[in-house]
Amino acid sequence: MCCTGPQWKREEVPDHKWDFVDVREFHNSGCMSYFQYFFLYVLVIKSILVYCSDVYTMVLLLASNHWAGSILENSNGNSAMIVPFSISKWIFFGCIIFSFSLLFWEAKKSRAIIKSRDISYAFTNVMANNYYSIKSYDRFCFFSQINNSKKKKDDLAFFIFFTFKSWKRLLLADAPIQVINALTLFSFARSVGFTTDLPKYYNGSLAKASVLVSMIFTVTIWVGSFLLLLVATFMYVPLLCYMRGNLKEYCCHQVDKRIAELMKQKNRKRLAKEAAIMRKEAMGDYSHLKDKKGHFKAEPLPQPTLPNIQMDEWI
């Protein structure tokens, strides 16, 4: 099965550019769509704040030679950091630098995709997707309809594709930091005998409680993302036998295929609407062209006529 050629590569599906798509036809005025658009802004602002926090942390690490305050001290008054500050400092610093390197590299690729005006590449690139979506609500609706029109069998491919896109950040930029956080949490728990009495972990200090909660949250999110990456890795093998080709190429092919289907649907609806209008006007009904006062706000469509031939001129 894995040795035969892929069927999807034999399908002729054209590439789609923004120049040939009227995204106004895909406008969605639903409340859920507006909520999703608002949530997109929240995610983008959150990402910006995370990078600002990384810059602030990096400056503090360079200006310090120890962890500030007693927030990271356990119940015995000793530091809960298992990894010495002289080592963890440069681990944090290196991970932050690598995170920004990935950001700049992704921005460079996104810039090339935006210049190409290719829709399938923009859809499969997170930064380009966010750029187009924030720039135009109609394009956000267009992307949403592409996403909603995917077939169930393609959901697995897109899940694996977008999960794989974050592996560098997950394993190389976030993993070392989260390992240090996990070791710190383990040290806190061990210092109080792994008790279930939660107040003993922070001894009435709201600052220590907030730090512990944030560390638990980030470690939990990272573990969840890592488990998703493992699931995607195991599921990639059977998917590879199914698609028998490059994953990105397959996803872009499916996006272009969905766009072609959406364009055909919109074209059929547009032709049906124009035919209905022509039938109304042929019967003398021009109510759709009039305003509340009964005045014409647009010209009616031209009706087909028979040529008027004067036979006397030919005799």
Image: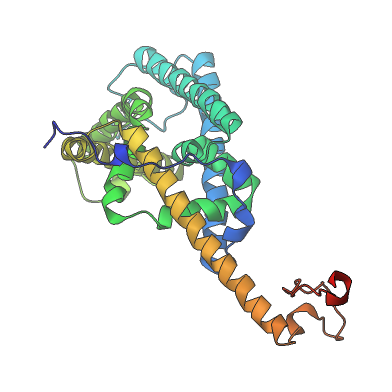
- In the rendered view, tell whether residue 104 sits above or below residue 231: above
The residue located at (38%, 24%) in the rendering is 173
In-image side of 11 versus 260 (left or right): left
Give the quarter of the figure containing the C terminus.
Answer: bottom right
Residue 217 position within the rendered picture, expressed as x and y whole percent measured from the top left: 36, 43
Q: Position of residue 235 (x, y in %)?
A: 19, 40
Q: Residue 128 falls in which quadrant of the image?
A: top right
The count of marks equals 0
The way the protein has been coloured in the rendering is rainbow
Q: Position of residue 269 (x, y in %)?
A: 54, 68
Quarter holding residue 116 = top right
* Image point (38%, 30%), residue name: 72
Q: Name the residue at the front extreme.
A: 315
Question: What residue is rendered at 58% in x and 47% in y?
Answer: 133
Q: Where is 173 relative to 261, above or below?
A: above
**Foreground residue among 176 and 292:** 292
Closer to the camera, 170 or 265? Answer: 265
Residue 219 in sight in this render: no
Identify which residue, 13 or 2, lies in the foreground: 13
- Quadrant including the N terminus: top left
The answer to whether residue 8 is left or right of residue 46 is left
Q: Could you say which is closer to the camera, residue 32 or residue 293? A: 293
Q: Tell me the residue at 13%/31% (across/down).
A: 3
Q: Position of residue 201 (x, y in %)?
A: 30, 43
